[in-house]
Amino acid sequence: MKEMEPFKLLVSHEEAKKIILRTCIPTERIEKIPIDEAAGRVLASDVKADRFVPPFERSAMDGYAVIAEDTYGADEREIYLELDGVIHAGEVSAQEVRHGHCVQIATGSPLVSGANSVVMVEYTERHEDRILVTKPVYPGANVSKKGEDIEEGDLVLTAGAWLTPAKIGTLAALGWTEVEVYTSPRIAVIPTGEEIVTPGDNLNPGQIYDVNSFTLETILRANGAQVDRFGIVGDDYSALKDTIEKALQYDMVILSGGSSVGEKDLLAGILADVGEVLFHGVQIKPGKPTLYGVAQNTPVFGMPGYPTSCLSNAYIFLVPAVRQMARLPPEHQNTVFAKISKRLVSASGRQQFLTVRIRNEIAYPVYKHSGAITSMATADGYIILPVNLDVIEEGETVEVILFE
Amino acid sequence: MKEMEPFKLLVSHEEAKKIILRTCIPTERIEKIPIDEAAGRVLASDVKADRFVPPFERSAMDGYAVIAEDTYGADEREIYLELDGVIHAGEVSAQEVRHGHCVQIATGSPLVSGANSVVMVEYTERHEDRILVTKPVYPGANVSKKGEDIEEGDLVLTAGAWLTPAKIGTLAALGWTEVEVYTSPRIAVIPTGEEIVTPGDNLNPGQIYDVNSFTLETILRANGAQVDRFGIVGDDYSALKDTIEKALQYDMVILSGGSSVGEKDLLAGILADVGEVLFHGVQIKPGKPTLYGVAQNTPVFGMPGYPTSCLSNAYIFLVPAVRQMARLPPEHQNTVFAKISKRLVSASGRQQFLTVRIRNEIAYPVYKHSGAITSMATADGYIILPVNLDVIEEGETVEVILFE
């Protein structure tokens, strides 16, 4: 019978985060993918424009292509221009606008040769083949220059940019079909524990369903990772060690369960054997039994087995770690202020993450137990109680970080 | 030659949004999907627990299963208990804890028969086969009751819930492999215009690349839609009408380009022929030439052809419309306050959406032209200038809605 030893040296939340962010290195791997699959990805190289956008001088409005000088005085007296024809978008006209004449032109059509401006349709009246201009234009009015949007050679997007709809649109404007992005981190999620069963299988006495692989997979994917869920591994040294060693080809390995004290020290032992343990135990509640280390340059997390501890720590530690590896911008945390529904006493000596539900600007604690997934599932967000805080009085204002 | 007529009756931004949200009906279609693909989807039916979680009474801590009464006084005198064995997670013990005895127990293991509490390993010392208890426990200490998290029959999730990681975890905890969610709206995106070319193809004189299908696809997918990008359709009545009629089997039809005045009134005419035009022209800048109507109960948008107008209106009108159809919660808009870098004069008589870039808490306008995709791609967000506003002075504080 193996002895159980309690955690010895707990690191603080801040220290744990610092260690993780120091060792979860931003990826250098690059891949080329179609632009219509690149949304939310991170650009791996600068985009220099290889053409002008638009590639020609064009009308910015529906109206008439004119020689501006012909319209001077149109606000004081009647000026008619002869209508010589029409140019549609996508056409190039062989016509030339001469003094006293005009050509009907649609938005986006190449400007007709000879013309230097466009009178908006709103400032004209049509009289058969003659156009009455009711307002003068200056040379260049309602005309978009070639390259007005993008000039050939412009640095339009820089490496590291996060590909928003507009940035995808910029690539399309240049006619690109593919783009170089950083490869999404590949993460192995390994559920461990003799009592864990995959949903859908039968539960025997003493067994429960695997929750953590599913919550981890969901949150990791939402933060830019590719996730492979492994089969469940029991509390067996060589089976666990084999699985971890195989998983080290991934960019990150996350084990769920198996990092509590007692026989579960197994995992810390294996990590020490194949790499280095950087911390084991964090001064937070829930989520204390968290193990972290590096093996063959791959970060390895031993997440707590309890669903709320595991998911809470995923928000706190995994999300920033994965986003940094993926080179994504830091997560935007949405917060609201609310009044706490009841007096809270914090006696844990650890920084506490307390899930709450918000109704009518009042925050109701919903935390039951770190083993209860409903502590997270029924929550709108969480509040952080500092290590040195003893009491929050009923009705005090707290800042709630929303789950989203 | 067809006549061009200017827009006649512009609706306000608010009125346009009201019309859209009244006619983009939340979906009633339901599908069953695997829980590991259900993240971000919307639950279509209540989830009633069909089992207890956990399904048995278990230890909440690593330690020793004891009869609490045996530990009373442990803080005052030395109390030793005989160690009778160990129970691991996933095991069910046939043992029974008797007075003066204990069984080593791991977190999550079923509580041993006869025991009524668990002493944490932290409050014990092991002396061979005897355990020194250093702190008494009360009956029930460190024990999780059967159903502590979820009781059979509990309503754990309600229809309409947005499936967060914790809610997916709740389904896993119940052993579910599939879940009923609302079907994501299927949207047809149809690029129109004679001058438009698909990226990757060659540009002839007068032609430009299709930008809008790509920006629309990206933003719609990010807001819960399935998108089919159609091939480019020219400015031809019967080709456009055929395509639109085929596309009416989708939940929403979005045409880009082809809603400006002039010959592009084509689209408004077709929409009037196959359904009903609800507005044509909105009092906003950019984005005025926007057409909206309903045909065979399917909402049909004619988005402006200019990339910035199109994408700006996608943020303003399409995102709330699609999220409502998908039954997703309203988009969370992140805003920041910044000082405007220069004096702005608004003389458009329309509500204006002005893209800005933020550096050191100063908002620099980056809007070039509604035809310039870079007006969006280089922006961090936008500010809204009301219809009745004339001037914002340099250094005034503005609220910036961030693109994210």
Image (cartoon, coloured by chain):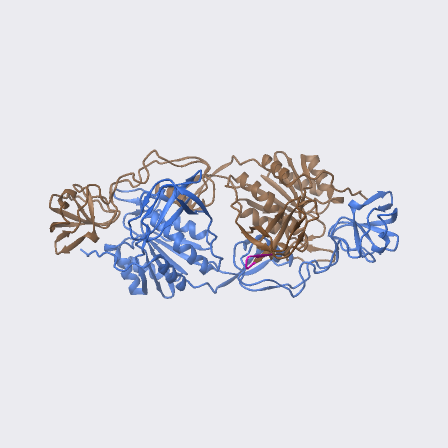
Chain colours: A brown, B blue
Within the magenta stretch, is there residue B397? no
Q: Nearer the viewer, residue B27 or A392?
A: A392
Q: Quadrant of residue A189?
A: top right
Q: Nearer the viewer, residue B33 or A353?
A: A353
Which stretch appears magenta? Answer: A359-363
Residue shown at the point (54%, 44%) measured from the top left: A225
Residue A133 pos. (x, y %): 15, 50
Rendered view: B369 above or below A361: above
Residue shown at the point (63%, 43%) measured from the top left: A254
Quadrant in which the N terminus of chain A is drawn: top right
Q: Quadrant of residue B379?
A: top left
Within the magenta stretch, is there residue A362? yes
Residue A104 pos. (x, y %): 18, 50
Residue B351 pos. (x, y %): 34, 53
Residue shown at the point (86%, 51%) measured from the top left: B73
Rendered view: A229 above or below B188: above
Rendered view: A316 above or below A25: below
Q: Nearer the viewer, residue B236 or B45?
A: B45
Q: Is residue A251 visible?
A: yes
